[in-house]
């Protein structure tokens, strides 16, 4: 699908067809494209927990304050981040490049993130948010719909997905076949209220 068309037709869908299934190959194709999304220094700090298991999806719906999207959607992806990624053998993030460049990246990561939890957390949210949009556009391309979600009990969801130490959940995206037409758009603010040329 054309990217402009995907941007225009992507909506936060509330009602998914519970009988629709995604194949393992479709999920793999989706995720293989999603991990091409950008991250600062290519640190790939995101971790994607995905499930099609009805029992787990049901639990996630309960954690999501009984919102139906996780249980009825075909695929639930919880976008998490490893807060230690910047320091986990970081030269591998540039594995196809010469050693000098790899060392330079390692140094830069140290300067930016060591003793700076705010920078680490900001980077986690940035990486996952960009990946989330990739997921939603890729879903449109695959003739599927999506719903980004943060309306969940963080501790309950963390327990369901067995969130490890030093990881955070950024958001979740549900993918599936929508039933019916979504509500009309809430309405976008005028462009000149949100976009400014050169400076505020
Ligand atoms: C970070 C984030 C969290 C959201 N959480 C929820 C949610 O928990 N449940 C829900 O139904 N929609 C959720 N939404 C969807 C928004 O309400 C929706 O994107 C917005 O109203 C604009 O509608 P549209 O995406 O259809 O254009 C979320 C969207 C974002 C970006």
Image (spheres, grey):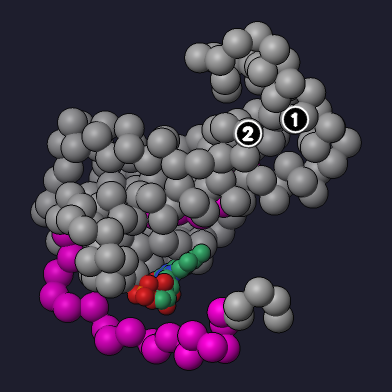
Tell me how far mark 2 sits from mark 1, CA to CA: 8 Å
Instruction: Check the image and name the residue furthest to the front.
Output: 198
**Magenta segment: does it hold 33?**
no
Which callout, 2 or 1, points at the residue further toward the start of the chain?
2
Q: Which residue is mark 1?
A: 109
The answer to whether residue 122 of the structure is visible from this angle is: yes
Tell me the tag on residue 41. Answer: 2
The crowding category of the residue bearing disc 2, from other C-alpha atoms within 10 Å (few below 14, some 14 to 19, many at least 20), is: some
- Tell me if 36 is positioned left or right of 27 in this view: right
Q: Quadrant of the C terminus?
A: bottom right
Residue at 66% in and 17% down:
102
- Image coords of residue 113 (percent x, y): 79, 36
Image spot of residue 61 (x, y percent): 38, 58
Residue 78 visible, this angle: no
Q: SS class of the residue under badge 2?
A: helix
Asked whether the beta carbons under mark 2 and mark 1 sit within 8 Å of each other, the answer is: yes
Magenta span covers which residues?
Answer: 168-195
Placement of 65 over or under 90, stated as above or below: below
Would residue 97 appear left or right of 8 to someone viewing this image? right
Q: Position of residue 133 (x, y in %)?
A: 41, 55
Please rate how many residues cluster around mark 1, counting C-alpha atoms within 10 Å: few if below 14, some from 14 to 19, many from 20: some
Please state the quadrant of the image where ligand 1 appears: bottom left
Q: Is residue 26 above or below residue 141?
A: above
Residue 182 magenta: yes
Instruction: Tell me: residue 130, above or below residue 115.
Output: below
**Residue placed at 50% from the left, 41% from the top?**
38
């Amino acid at each position: 699908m054309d990217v402009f068309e995907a941007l225009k037709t992507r909506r936060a869908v509330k009602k998914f067809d519970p009988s629709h299934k995604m194949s393992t190959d479709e999920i793999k194709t989706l995720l293989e494209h999603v991990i091409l999304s950008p991250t600062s220094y290519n640190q790939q700090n995101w971790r994607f927990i995905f499930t099609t298991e009805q029992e787990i999806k049901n639990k996630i719906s309960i954690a999501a304050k009984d919102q139906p999207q996780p249980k009825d959607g075909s695929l639930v992806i919880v976008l998490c981040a490893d807060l230690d990624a910047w320091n986990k053998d970081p030269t591998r993030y540039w594995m196809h490049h010469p050693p000098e460049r790899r060392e330079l990246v390692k140094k830069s990561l140290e300067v930016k993130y060591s003793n700076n939890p705010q920078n680490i957390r900001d980077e986690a949210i940035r990486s996952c948010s960009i990946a989330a949009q990739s997921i939603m556009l890729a879903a449109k391309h695959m003739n599927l719909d999506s719903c980004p979600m943060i309306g969940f009990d963080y501790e309950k969801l963390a327990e369901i997905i067995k969130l490890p130490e030093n990881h955070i959940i950024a958001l979740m995206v549900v993918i599936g076949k929508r039933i019916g037409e979504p509500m009309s758009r809430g309405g976008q603010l005028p462009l000149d209220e949100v976009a400014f040329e050169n400076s505020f």
